[in-house]
Amino acid sequence: MQNFAKAGESYVPALNYTVISTTVVFTLQKLIYTVYFVLIVSLIALFPLFTLAQDHQPLINSTLTGRVLDEKTKEALPGVLVQIKGTTHKVATDDKGRFNFKTGQKFPYTLIISFIGYEKSD
């Protein structure tokens, strides 16, 4: 079967349409790669600004050090949890019963002391 053009029209084979659409696809791919490249370069250039925005020291309003001892034997109690009441800030005592808080809380505050086998106290 042959394709003939009508009067005044030219015949364009289907192969040319494929070539044109392939060219359009390659052009779109180049455009997408260019957009990705610009985006990645922009993020790399702006990354130091994001890290500088987070470069600050935590607010420390008070520092508290202490030691937890058994009331009767006066021996140090390791592993005791010491918490500031009303916060989630907790520390555990070391092997000599010592603890150290650096916190944004202002004095005065109440400490909650808890240890397995002992009664919890404020």
Image: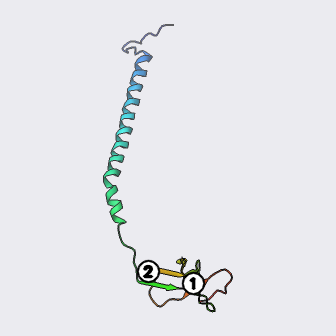
Q: Are marks 2 and 1 in contact (CB under 8 Å)?
A: no
Q: From the viewer's perspective, is 45 left or right of 68?
A: left
The spot of residue 120 in percent (x, y) is: 64, 86
The spot of residue 79 in percent (x, y) is: 59, 77
The spot of residue 47 in percent (x, y) is: 34, 55
- At 57% from the left and 87% from the top, the residue drawn is 69
Mark 1, secondary structure of its residue: loop
- At 39% from the left and 77% from the top, the residue drawn is 59
Q: From the viewer's perspective, is 19 left or right of 99?
A: left
Sooner in the amino-acid sequence: mark 2 or mark 1: 1
Which image quarter is the C terminus in? bottom right
**Figure check: 25 above or below 88:** above
Q: Which residue is mark 1?
A: 76
- At 36% from the left and 32% from the top, the residue drawn is 27
Q: Residues within 10 Å of mark 1 (few under 14, many from 20)?
A: some
**Which kind of residue does numbered mark 2 sit on?**
Gly
Mark 2, mark 1: which one is toward the viewer? 1
In which quadrant of the rendered view does residue 121 lie? bottom right
Q: Which residue is mark 2?
A: 104
